[in-house]
Image (tube, rainbow, N blue to C red):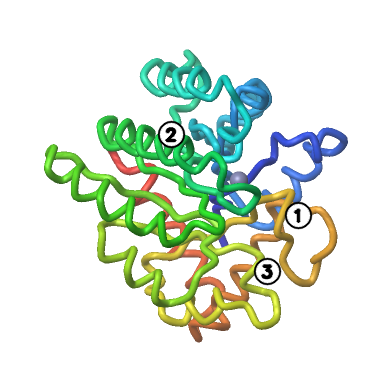
Amino acid sequence: MRLTDTHSHLYDEAFDADRAEVLERALQSGVERLLLPAIDSESHAALHALCREHPECCVPMMGLHPTSVNENPRWREELLLVEEYLRMPPIGLTPYCAVGEIGLDFYWSTEYCEEQIEAFRTQCRWAAELDLPVAIHTRAAWDAMCSIIEEECAAARARGQRLRGLFHAYSEGAEVYERLRKTGEWLFGIGGVVTYKKSIVAEAVKAMRLEEIVLETDCPYLTPVPHRGQRNEPSYVVHTCNKVAELLCVTPEEVAEQTSRNVERMFFRER
Ligand SMILES: [Zn+2]
């Protein structure tokens, strides 16, 4: 079985003590590739260092996280740094596979929603211009997200470009899924939450086409059952794979194979 963890914060300090062992366990479980989202300049060095150390399996993204816009008077400078990296990627680094993670997070505060929206739209436009997919974080903001995606997809098409990518940690039901998939070419990142009791994501997954699903951990967060309560790690993506297989009445091998193909198609096809 070959798997990709499409959203992994393995460079996070939560793994400072045993990062090599965690990565070894991932490879042993069949997780052959990790896509690593950026957050902001505080963690760029750690992200880049890990990807330089393991170019065979660790692939970086570049983007400004919505919660790093909140209460940050320097967020526009952060955004310019992201643009610089995207337009002139560091020499010797595996190319960025996506603009991410970017998005909207109104969970902690709505005080900065205008700023978050501006940062998000700006990064969507860079992604469309550079023909890179986006990796989108959405929390307590799904309605605004749907409207903006509809607008930005249409605007990209009008410019002769396309906006496409991944909704990381998809956490809504079938209705939002149907609304989003109509706007263009999207994948839906399913994580540990799908293994929790009474998860609405589980209901949404039943409505999804396997061709639109990818697997993720969002480690060190959102740990799947049976490890819930502990630190999450990339090897646990296996549990999410098994749960998705159960929901779609197919084998885990089929889920692994098709989700790997989906990753190739979105993030690694010839550009
Ligand atoms: Zn993340």
User: At 81% from the left edge and 40% from the top edge, which residue is drawn?
Assistant: 14
Q: Is 100 in front, or is 26?
A: 100
Q: Residues within 10 Å of mark 3 (few under 14, many from 20)?
A: many
Q: Do callouts 3 and 1 mark residues in contact (Cβ within 8 Å)?
A: no
Q: Which SS class for mark 1?
A: loop
Q: Position of residue 164 (x, y in %)?
A: 31, 49
Mark 2 highlights which residue? 119
Q: Do callouts 3 and 2 mark residues in contact (Cβ within 8 Å)?
A: no
Amino acid type at mark 2: Ala
User: Is 134 positioned to the left or the right of 269 in the image?
Assistant: right
User: How far separated are the C-alphas under marks 3 and 2?
Assistant: 34 Å
Amino acid type at mark 1: Asn
Q: Is mark 3 within 8 Å of ligand 1?
A: no
Q: Position of residue 45 (x, y in %)?
A: 65, 20
Disc assigned to residue 239: 3
Judge whether 31 appears above or below 190 on screen.
above
Q: Which SS class for mark 3?
A: helix
User: Is 46 positioned to the left or the right of 182 in the image?
Assistant: right
Q: Nearer the viewer, mark 3 or mark 2?
A: 2
Of labels 3 and 2, earlier in sequence is 2
Q: Is mark 1 within 8 Å of ligand 1?
A: no
Disc assigned to residue 65: none
Of labels 2 and 1, earlier in sequence is 2
Q: Is 17 in front, or is 160?
A: 160
Residue 271 seen in this snapshot: no
Q: Nearer the viewer, mark 3 or mark 1?
A: 1
Amino acid type at mark 3: His
Q: Which SS class for mark 2?
A: helix
User: Is 27 positioned to the left or the right of 112 in the image?
Assistant: right
Q: Is 69 in front, or is 258?
A: 69
Mark 1 highlights which residue? 232
